[in-house]
Image (cartoon, rainbow, N blue to C red):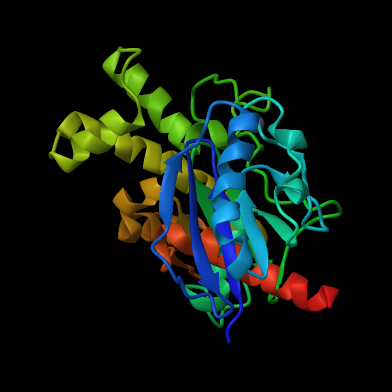
Amino acid sequence: MSKKFLAFDIGGTKISHALIDENGTLLSESQKHATPQSTEEIFALLHSIIAEHEQEIEAVAIATAGEVSLKHDRIIASVGNMPAGYHDIDFQALTNKPVYVENDANAALWGEYCCGAARNKKHAMLVAIGTGVGIAFLIDGKMLKGKSGAAGEAHFSINRGHHRRCGCGAYDCYEIYASGTALGLDAKEAYQDANVDSHTIIQGIKQGDERAQKVFDHWQENVTSGIIGLVNIFDPEIVILFGSLTEFMDYDKIEKAVNQDITAEPIQLKRATLKNNAAIIGAALIAKDCLQAAN
Ligand SMILES: [Zn+2]
C-alpha cells in the first residue's frame, strides 16, 4: 500500500494541510486555517491536526516561511512575518512520527519539478509570493540550498523610487516591493487610506475597478524587475510563480517583459501547475526522500 504523509504549508497569513501519497497525489482536499497570532497556538493547531491522522501516516511534512536547516529539522532564520518565538518552534515535539521541514519556496519548486510545470526542466526558478517573498532555484536538477539551507531569500535591494523598510530591518529589499505585504502598502499609498490592503485590490480587480488594476499592474512590474535580475544571474529554463496572488497575474505580459530585458536565452514563465498545493506536495515528496535516506 502506498505510503501516506500529512503535509502542511505554514505562512504568515494561512496554514493549509492535506494527506498526500508517495506519488504526490492529494488524498484529501487541502484545508486552510488562518495563521494563529502566537507560536503556542500554531503549535496547538498543528498538534491537533496531526493527532487526527497520526495512525495512518509515515511522516509529517512541513513547508514553512523562513529559512530551514540542511537537515530539514528546524528553522534557522528569517521568520519576520511570523509570530514571536516561531523561530524556535520544536517541530519534532509535535508527534512520535518523523517530521521533515523545508522552506516553502523550495518545497513548491520541488513539487513543480516532480509533478508540475518544471517537470523535466533541470534549471528552474520559483518565486513564492505570500506575506513575504521566497525564491527557490533548481540547478542541474538539484535544489540550491547554500551552506546552511538559507539560499534564496529575497533580501537584496531594488530601486523603485521609494524608501521602504523591509521586515528584515534593511531598506528597499525586493521582498518589500514584491510581496502581498507590498501590494497592501501600494494600495495604502495609492488610495491615501490606511484601511485598504491587498484584499481591497483583489476585490477591485475582480469587479473591473480601474484604480485597483493600476495598483496591481504597478506591483506586478516590481515583481517583474526582480525576476529579470535573477534570470540574468541563474539562467533558468522556466520561472514559476507560486502563491494565492499569482492567480491574478498576467503571465504573457511578465514573460514578454522579462524576455525583452534579459541577456540570456528566453525563459518560460508560468503559474505553478499544482496551484496553491505545490508546497504541500513538494514537502511530502521531500519527506519521502528523507525517510528513504534514513532507513
Ligand atoms: Zn529585507
Q: Quadrant of the C terminus?
A: bottom right
Q: Residue 48, percent across and down?
A: 57, 46
With respect to residue 202, does 165 lie above or below? above
Q: Camera-side residue: 280 or 99?
A: 99
Q: Camera-side residue: 77 or 92?
A: 92
Q: Residue 6, percent across and down?
A: 57, 62
The extreme left residue here reads 208
Q: Residue at x 68, y 73 (%)?
A: 288
With respect to residue 264, does 92 lie above or below? above
Asked if residue 263 can be seen in this view, the reply is no
Asked if residue 161 can be seen in this view, the reply is yes
The image quarter containing residue 272 is bottom left
Q: Residue 12, percent across and down?
A: 53, 36
Q: Residue at x 74, y 51 (%)?
A: 151
With respect to residue 189, does 207 lie above or below? below
Q: Residue 160, percent across and down?
A: 49, 30
78 relative to 125 in the view: left or right? right
Q: Quadrant of the N terminus?
A: bottom right
The extreme bottom residue here reads 1
Image-quarter location of ligand 1: top right
123 relative to 184 in the view: left or right? right
284 relative to 291 in the view: left or right? left
Q: Residue at x 22, y 36 (%)?
A: 203
Q: Camera-side residue: 198 or 125?
A: 198
Q: Residue at x 59, y 70 (%)?
A: 56
